[in-house]
Image: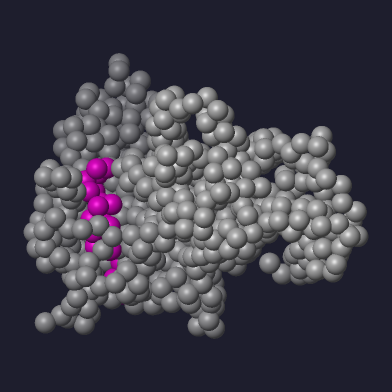
Amino acid sequence: MPDPSHLLQTRDLQTGYQTGNKKTITTRGPLDLDIRAGQLICLLGPNGAGKSTLLKTLAGLHPPLEGRVEADGADIRSVTPIQRARIVSLVLTDKVTTQHLTVYSLVALGRYPYSGWLGGLSEADRTAIEWAIEVTGIQAFRDRKVFTLSDGESQKVMLARALAQDTPILMLDEPTAHLDLPSRIRLMRLLHQLAQQTNKGILLSTHELELALQVADEVWLLQNAETLHRGAPEDLVLNGAFEAAFAHEDIRFDKQTGTFIIPHDDSRPVLLAGEGVAVYWTKRALQRSGFVVTVDPDTPCRIRVSGEESSTKWILENAGSSEEYDSIKNMLNALENTVIK
Amino acid sequence: MSGIYPKIRLIGLLLLLLLVFLLDIAVGPVKIPLGDVFRILFSFPSGDSTWQFIVQQIRLPKACTAVLAGCGLSVSGLQMQTLFRNPLADPSVLGITSGSSLGVATVMLAGGNVATLYAIRELGLSGSWLITAAACLGAGIVMLLVLVLSARLRDNVMMLIIGIMIGSVTLSIISIWQYFSAPELVKDYLLWTFGSLGGVTNSQLPILGSVIGAGVIMAWLSSKMLDALLLGENYARSMGLNPQRARLMIICSSSLLAGGITAFCGPIGFVGIAVPHITRQLFRASSHRVLVPACCLTGTLLLLLCDLLSQLPASQTILPINIITALIGAPVVITLLLRQKNINAY
């Protein structure tokens, strides 16, 4: 019995490629996944973990090795291409290189499953296109040629095209790749809002772990073709799934801050005391410079952070001597010299 | 596409087309006064029966052939550039015209004859149909082969190389046959490969016309699919395009166009590659609903101009059309590519 809030469901799914008799499995199942209305799901995983294949399989563009993907109780591979295009829309990593295509025409192509024989647009089509252009904020360059757009602009245009397709499910393959940080944040926020306001189910694959932690309602974490962890992002942090998925000898996941750190071999212990934002950033600076922040009270080298925002002082205590510094940089310089001595 | 400029441009192009069409009929190795040409064209009695024969049986069918070939070659080039997502694709580059040549040669060989202009003219109506079918089949097989191989490669440059290789293979099969043929026959065949618009008789014109007409209409009906393919096959499929049906439709249409023209006129190069580029620049459009008819317009214009040029230099002889299309087409393509910022864009 299909649950109405489940837009898409998988049954015993296993994805991969089959060439001749040779099977290349990218996600070993059986996977039982579902996408619900109004939910933003981030698909995370290292390069080559099979994110794109899973996405294309869920969208019905790629045949599953085992099991099936169901939308509205029907197998997504057995419905007609037009019907499928009315269920799932996609934003891919493929580049559009056509010279004379304008932004408006590109967005209008999203109406393909609805428009007439020769692509003629009805009033409803035009309304949908206008809405998509407005929501994504691309009015300013609606008449420009697509190939003149920056990466950030063109990603928004591709999103507008997918929105014009007016589907309950929207899937995006690495939409934040090639974007600068503000564009990445804006795009993620826009997707978050869209999921809530339009009640669409949105699934996106990304490498932006920190952004995903902030906006995702659910995270699907692919771990090298073996397992897929799913859950609230915070749960996956706490149960060590993130650490395991990205486990690598020269990178470590810090549960405290939700970031990756590069550990140094010759790590030197430092005790850090104090409160507020400055402590967080001091900790980061110390980690970057190859120090390990401990809570061991016997550590000879200690740093105390005190004072308010603009008048923060860093007090470095080492073997009885105590010195005060007005910036992290000066404190670090002194610390390096102290420890080497 | 708003404002008065596109309308003026369209009317201007149509008037130019009419002018060039009439000029193409008026000019030729035999001097016929302009007044007489018009009188013959509009079926008024004219003084000279030779003139009447020349205009009605030679020049008018030739001009009509130029119109059909111009439409067919440019529309098939446009379709192929979109299908293969490659600005350099066209029937002759991808070996599709060579496939048609092989088809034509096979029919000629089986009939104990050789593919010469004379032989084509002498063929009866059933023979014309047969040769057209063989040429279209040859074109379709080569195109299918290129498509199957390119699907495994997913790379434009590789696909182009494969097209050229298949073209070479078909040409060498023809060469084997040429090698064992009498020298005069080889010369005749070579003349056919130069291309000519003058090989179509009044009675064959309806055959060519219906084949090209069917091809162009199919192309126009598939313009929505072609538009979707502009974004690449993955996007097109995500929007509900049925890739098998789209490919079948485009291959059928392109094979009819390229095959039909090659059967009657020989392999004509450069029109298929140059015209779509010129048309996109001229009309600043990407929608195939506009581009297909627009390509017909510019393609016809270009081929009529080429035909006109082929008669002018030494007014007693007519140069093979392929020489002129290459001389005009190659610089046009180079200029367009240099002017474009992005070579990969089409």
**Residue at x-position 17% and y-position 48%:** A18
Q: Is residue B278 left or right of residue A121?
A: right
Q: Split into 4 quadrants, where in the image is the N terminus of chain B?
A: bottom right
**Residue at x-position 12% and y-position 43%:** A22
Q: Is residue B280 left or right of residue A172?
A: right
Q: Give the residue furthest to the top.
A: A341
Where is residue A222 drawn, in percent x and y? 19, 51
Seen in the picture, residue B292 relative to B322 is either above or below; the reply is: below
**Residue at x-position 33% and y-position 34%:** A288
Magenta part of the protein: which range? A38-59
- Please say whether residue A71 is visible from this viewpoint: yes
Queried whether the magenta region covers residue A58, the answer comes back as yes
Seen in the picture, residue A333 relative to A100 is either above or below; the reply is: above
Where is residue B184 drawn, in percent x and y? 55, 28
Queried whether the magenta region covers residue B213, the answer comes back as no
- Please say whether residue A242 is visible from this viewpoint: no
Front-most of residues B38 and A132: B38
